Image: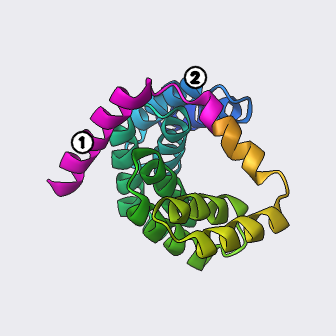
Amino acid sequence: EASGPNLATAYYNRGNANLQKSEFRKAIDDFTQALKFDPDNANALHERCWARGVLAVDLEDALSDCNQSLRVRPNDAETLGGRGFVYLRLGFYRTAILDYDAALEFKPDTPEYLFGRGLAKAQVGDDAAAHADFEAARALEPKIAERFERYDSLAEGGGFWSTLIDYWRAAMRWLY
């Protein structure tokens, strides 16, 4: 029988448990409930951003979550890395690189950030830097490529047109 802040914590904890089980839809629902009771919970905002990014759904809302999380807790490496991943999903490769760079300043040995930045660098044609990032990420976590392939297999985003719509919505939100 939890209420108020305790209920927010309960939803947040269950959301994290769902993330661990790769039940991203359930995690999003739990983080949404936690945020009803604690709207400025930077952790819940970041985790919901991440879950949406993995599923490649509601990407404009994912950016909003990460941006709000960064307003509450500036320069958080995990949120910067998560937002970098969302930008990567949206095709904002140069912006993804900037976020990954910022995240790596705080946590330089994080394979997810190195690999994500490598993917973005490859998309902008910086093949040598992409290769260096991939190698550094694999040195830290040999199966990092498989993890990113798994993220792609989990994406529910609806294909090209859905991604294009999310891209333009995110661009409009970012500009305005």
Which percent across, then down, holds residue 165? 28, 33
Q: Is residue 149 above or below residue 78?
A: above
Which percent across, then down, holds residue 97? 48, 67
Q: Nearer the viewer, residue 139 or 1?
A: 139
Side of 6 relative to 45 (left or right): right
Which percent across, then down, holds residue 105? 57, 79
Name the N-terminal-most of marks 1 and 2: 2
Quarter of the figure with residue 17: top right
Q: Which residue is mark 2?
A: 26
**Residue at x-position 54% and y-position 37%:** 51
Range of the magenta residues? 152-176
**Residue at x-position 56% and y-position 66%:** 77
As helix, strand or loop, the secondary structure at mark 1 comes to helix
Q: Amino acid at mark 1?
A: Trp
Q: Amino acid at mark 2?
A: Lys
Q: Is residue 60 above or below residue 117?
A: above
The crowding category of the residue bearing disc 2, from other C-alpha atoms within 10 Å (few below 14, some 14 to 19, many at least 20), is: some
Q: Which residue is mark 1?
A: 168
Which percent across, then down, holds residue 88? 47, 52
